Image (cartoon, rainbow, N blue to C red):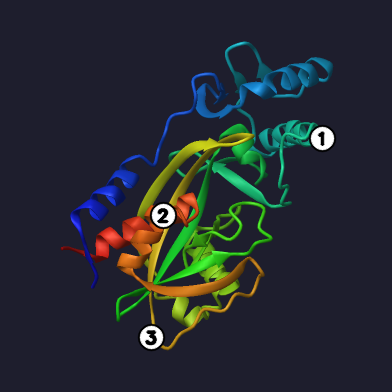
Amino acid sequence: MDSLNTSTQAALEEMLQNTARTPPVDFLPVYFNHSLIGCINPEFIPYLQETLNKAPIALIQLDQQRLSIAQGRPIEVSQSLQTLTERLRLGGLIPGWRNEEFAWLDADGHEHFRLERAAFKTFGFRSLAAHINGYTKSGLIWLGRRSESKSIDPGRLDNLSAGGISADETPWVCAKRELWEEAGVPIQLAQAIQPAGRIPLRRVSPPFGFHDELLYVYDLELPDHFVPTNHDGEVSGFIAVSYAEAAARILADEFTGDASLVTADFILRHSKLK
């Protein structure tokens, strides 16, 4: 295994200690059934006031202190939020529409609503994602390079595979799906993934919102002869590097924000201090 010098180790550890930041104080809180679940860019408030004054939406109230979503059946809450989301989209406030739904889950894992994936950052709702570290027994870690056509972080380094967990998906199912779509890992090999914890990620996501995501982390040992192959066009290529080189590329800001944290966590768990 690679050895890390003390300064590299300290830098990676500091990254992982600062993954969950608080929203800016001027962001408008979003409450669901009296519980804080998100926040909205203050620049959106005039548009929200105008559209809700013209045509109120069931279960949704806006005042100077908060946007409130009332308790209701999940299908009713989803319909109300979808109506508001469509209006925000028409106003140009939700870019990158995906036609894919995420589910919002409470602390007990119960779903209370589902919504277009792109709207989660706009509302600051917590989403879920699965990230897989692919490594070899010989001490290399596989990294993907995002396609230049990606709307977010084009050309940056990523994990072997990663992706948002859609509504009706579990982290485990998402991880295996992404392994095949992004890296061509067959199901027989993907079954060997090992859960390696969770990393909370909370940060401002310019220009529109706040990114609140819980990253489910998995490790997968790959045969030395295995070469990843992308199937969905989202990855332009792969490189296999030593842990020390991966750490250097993290500190050189070559990774996406979430992949840098997942890779740093992996390196610290698998490397020795020099």
Q: Residue at x 48, y 37 (%)?
A: 203
Report which residue position mark 1 lands on: 90
Q: Earlier in the sequence, mark 3 or mark 1?
A: 1
Q: In this view, does 57 lie to the left or right of 171?
A: right
Kindly report the distance in space between the C-alpha atoms of the residues bearing marks 3 and 1: 50 Å
Q: What element carries label 3?
A: loop
Residue at image x 19%, y 54%?
A: 6
Q: Residue furthest left?
A: 274
Q: Position of residue 219 (x, y in %)?
A: 37, 67
* Mark nearer the viewer, 1 or 2: 2
The residue labelled by disc 2 is 252
Q: Which of 80 and 207 is in front in this view?
A: 207
Asked whether residue 92 appears in the rendered view, the answer is yes
Mark number for residue 224?
A: 3
Q: Which of 165 and 46 is in front in this view?
A: 46
| Image point (34%, 60%), residue name | 247
In this view, which residue lies farthest toward the bottom?
225
Dot 1: within a 10 Å radius of its alpha carbon, few (fewer than 14), some, or many (20 or more) residues? few
Task: Please state the horizontal and vertical placement of residue 204, each as a whole percent of the image.
Answer: 52, 35
Amino acid at dot 1: Leu
